Image: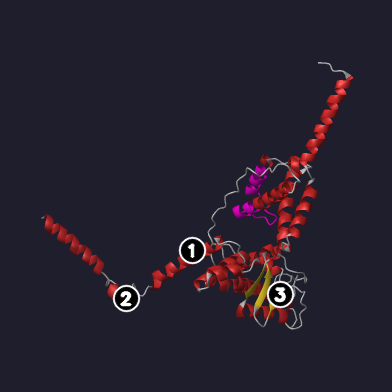
Amino acid sequence: MKMSKRRQNGVQNVTNVQQSIDSQEQGLSFDDALELFMMSRSALNLSEASQKDYRSVIRLFLSYIQEKRHYRLLGEIEEKDIIEWLSYLSGAKSAWGRPYSSRTIETYNRDVTIFFSWLVSHGHLSVNPMAGLKAPKVDKALIRLFSEDELKRLDMACDRMPKGRALTEDERKALAARDRALLWFLLSTGIRVSEACSLKFADVSWNEEMIYVQGKGAKERRIPFGKIARQHLDTYVRYWRGEPLDKVHSDDYVFLTAFGHPLSAHGAWKIFSRLKMVASIDDKRVSPHTCRHWFAVNAIKNGMPTIVLKNILGHENWDMIEIYVHLAQQDLKQSYNRFSPVDALEMHRYPEGKRARMQEWRTSRKQDKRS
């Protein structure tokens, strides 16, 4: 139907107003939304590691949406876009070339959920596209711990064999001392790899053999590290970094790269990848986090109260502690079967061939009765 020019102008004005309203409801740009959210994390006094994790995950999510959908405003994101991203993660590989685990995907989903919930609760977004989504299911991974023989092989694998001319002999020995110190330090404390890499000399009390760790949620923990870890740290710092323990600068990082930079979590993972290959351990994961599992289970087996372990590890809930207790109990059951004092008594053991003779006797009795 043909409209007059006046009516056409009126319809156009209504359309422009509706587009303006829709644009306002779509909210912030991706960059502005991310920066606002990160300021809120900083205001909550979260640790630098936690803030870095949030920024990394949300940036990964927004980059994917921008590349696939070409959206510019946060309000354009719909539930189906998030489902597509989660589906993509289940078949993709991380920057390190490894598939994303179900636990990693669940963590990414949780971080993005917190991101959208904060934006809605503070009026920056009218609709939460994740409101109806359930969290992805996490596979129950089998935790396999190091045996004592494997620990010996990992310790030996720290010694770096001459390879090419990239490193001098002294540099190889220094890196071997660092790798060994890192290995036994993680096994002795159960701290996260990010916490070990961010450790400074100001955080270490050599006399008390204690470290002060800034963990998740900006919570500081006080953790003992034991004489073996101290011995390897002392060798690394005193002899191969050439810095007496009473002379090191408090702001210096404990673990360094070959070029004197702070060791990153990625660098630590590469160290353990090399140790795995040299030690020829193929049937289990060899990583800094496996050291954390090993510490926890063996601490329980040695009698450490679970509340103490929970505080040392920095867990906010009991879920992971219960898994460690279960693993420790499984191992205790195997030990009991081997060393039970009653089952080991000679009086309960059948002489060789006695069981077979008893079976023959029972069979013959049954045949006699039938006849």
- Circle nearer the N terminus (2, 3): 3
Above/below status of 112 relative to 363 = above
Q: Quadrant of residue 193?
A: bottom right
Q: Which residue is drawn at 74% across and 83% down?
A: 246
- The CA distance from mark 2 to mark 3 is 53 Å
Amino acid type of the residue tagged 1 in the rendering = His
Colour convention: secondary structure
Q: Residue at x 56, y 74 (%)?
A: 152
Q: Residue 326 carries which label?
A: 1
Residue 45 magenta-drawn?
no
Magenta stretch: dominant secondary structure: helix
| Residue underneath mark 3 | 203
Above/below status of 119 relative to 305 = above
Q: Is residue 241 visible to us here? A: yes
Residue sitting nearer the eye, 181 or 74: 74
| Residue underneath mark 2 | 345
- Circle nearer the N terminus (1, 2): 1
Count of residue discs: 3
- The CA distance from mark 1 to mark 2 is 29 Å
Quick check: marks 1 and 3 in contact, CB under 8 Å?
Answer: no
Q: In which quarter of the image is residue 215?
A: bottom right
State the image coordinates of residue 211 (x, y, percent, origin top left): 67, 75
Residue 91 magenta-drawn?
yes
State the image coordinates of residue 135 (x, y, percent, origin top left): 60, 48
Pair 1/2: label in front: 1
Image quarter where the C terminus lies is bottom left
Q: Viewed as shown, does residue 271 lie left or right of 323?
A: right
Q: Viewed as shown, does residue 192 lie left or right of 242?
A: left
Q: Is residue 159 visible to us here? A: no
Amino acid type of the residue tagged 3 in the rendering = Asp
